[in-house]
Amino acid sequence: MCGIAGILTSEPYDGAELSGWARRMSEPIQHRGPDDGGVWADERSGIALGFRRLAILDLSPNGHQPMASPSGRFVTVFNGEIYNFADLRRELEPHGHRFRGGSDTEVMLAAFEQWGIEAALTRLVGMFAVAVWDTHRRELTLFRDRLGKKPLYVYAEPGLVTFGSELKVLAAGPSFDRAVDREALASYLRNLYVPAPRSIFARASKLPAAHLLTISDPRSPLPPARPYWSLRAAARAGLASPIASEEEAIDRLDDLLVDAVRCRLRADVPLGALLSGGVDSSTVVALMQEASPRPVKTYTIGFADQEFDEARHAERVARHLGTEHTELELTGADALALIPRLPEVFDEPLADPSQVPTCLVAELARRHVTVALSGDGGDELFGGYNRYVYGTRMLPRLQRMPGLVRRGVGVGMGRVSSRTWDRLGAIAGRLPGVRPQRVGERVHKLARLMAAGTVGDMYRSLLSAWPPAEALLDTAVPREQSDGILDGGERMDLLDRMLLADQMVYLPDDQLARVDRATMAASLELRSPLLDHRVAELSWRIPHRMKVRGTTGKWILRQVLYRRVPKDLIERPKMGFSIPIDRWLRGPLRAWAEGLLDENAVRGGGLLDPRPIGRAWSDLQEGRRPTGMALWAIVMFQAWSARWLGSSPPAAVAGDSRACA
């Protein structure tokens, strides 16, 4: 795993100047590649490539980048891993290709020479963000992996194109316009992240997953990116050819996951796994341990707050599988130390609170290993989120209610304070068999859902931080890719529309962006076997009844796991990997957040209306509404603005760390 940077310009820079820019642009991402670095420049073409290396395969100088193909035609910088490179190498050798070392980059370059870039790209199995310069055609080609595991940002203005693994690469280039894209900000407030292809900066964009972009003249506007693989097409094809037999579906998924895990165990450095004790990570670790002659190293984060703590479950699974397990309990002191660093780690606003434990578990694992496997993707592929069960049951029923009645009931429920609902829940909890948790938060979420219009609007209300985002700024939320899917743009059942929207937007732009930034900030490579694109394609051939059965999600993935781990170690209500954000904002993070949410500070930014933010803060502190998630989005944006738009953020204020725990 590495970091890439580059520049294509029409300015008459000499080779030394171009190399200097590539080096300067690479410096801010040394965390992505602390082991080595390199630059390559062609003065005649105005192109320079920069690279930071985290050495994983072939630790010798033969793995150094930028790397040229044997003929010298292609020069590349490559972030990621090609898991089937050994198979491709065996396929290429009979064609006369010879290899100096054992890196996947060298094999990829030979594949470009043998088949061309686009044809070779379709053969790659892995995670990648790649820049390749064709010296014959004088063309720059950028491309990303199919599901969007590795990031790639592009900045363009007349005569200049820069690109890199993170926005901070572009900001270090010869020119960078920091004007905020107000529509991207509106999307962020709605989603807690900025969906591709937009970025928070108006002139910068994200290359979408499964797309490639070819640039020959930096003076011309960027051409449209082209898809080389389509998740939407894979979904349609899978739905048209379902696997009818449960036994066949389980066996095929089992076989494919065994292969996906095994090919991700190849590394010339220490390797481990992140283990929460849930279905996804337990499946990955079980398959790893099955393939390993030694105990797998596993890592988890715990909380003293039992409502959020999964460490005890992870420890039981680890003990059963015989892994070498390490656990770290997250405290308020840990959060206070980390949270002010988040705007540096996440150089685009991201307000998924699980970013905090993700950063900390990555730092924990990196003390011992350089590569870790994770269970990311199981929920999105196999129907694991509670909202899938809840949504498919509730949304069609609510849609059948008269709109005025539904909205009236929703308004009435929302007017009762969160604290009152919690008290009612506590009373109900005295009844046998009743275990209410976060009642006020859930009732207020239901109230928002009932106030929505279409089924798509209802589903989005389950995810939105500020419904509507227009309450904070005078810009409407732009229509997004997920809107068309959820509102019936695809002739699919509701569950399939939810899954497709989440796989195409939420997964790459929230989940995978979060784990990439958090792990790479710790110089840890993360591999996600459940997100092998072959697994994604197979998942669409698996019928609903094998994904969500009754109130149980990921039914088929559980069957694969139960072949290796007893059911009683796994069966429990889904918790999620998050933090008690409402309690923390009322407790030890309160003073820090208040500084960022100060009316003058918000108004001075010139983007957000401080009045609804002030009301939300009062509601949280006084227990009227659970507004922690909405406020977390504002706090993260304000902290990001202070770092990247010019002012200094307030320091975290120490408090009683036990209140965070």
Image (cartoon, rainbow, N blue to C red):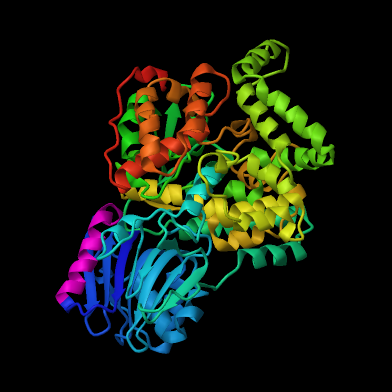
Which of 606 and 452 lies nearest the eye of the viewer? 606
Rendered location of residue 639, percent (x, y): 35, 39
Q: Residue at (49%, 59%) from the top-left corner?
A: 148
Residue 329 occupies which quadrant of the picture?
Answer: top left
Q: Is 195 drawn above or below residue 305 in the view shown?
A: below
Residue 552 occupies which quadrant of the picture?
Answer: top right
Which of 99 and 173 lies nearest the eye of the viewer? 173
Q: Residue at (31%, 87%) from the top-left corner?
A: 71
Rendered location of residue 608, percent (x, y): 45, 41
Which of 329 and 266 lies nearest the eye of the viewer? 329
Q: Is residue 74 visible?
A: yes
Rendered location of residue 174, percent (x, y): 24, 66
Q: Residue at (56%, 62%) from the top-left corner?
A: 533
On-image quarter of the C terminus: top left
Horizontal placement of 452 versus 525: left or right? Answer: right
Rendered location of residue 207, percent (x, y): 46, 65
Which of 287 and 430 lies nearest the eye of the viewer? 430
Horizontal placement of 447 versus 471: left or right? Answer: right
Q: Is residue 328 visible?
A: no
On-image quarter of the N terminus: bottom left
Q: Main secondary structure of the magenta part?
A: helix
The region drawn magenta spans 16-33
Q: Residue at (70%, 13%) from the top-left corner?
A: 428
Q: Does the magenta-highlighted stretch encompass residue 346?
A: no
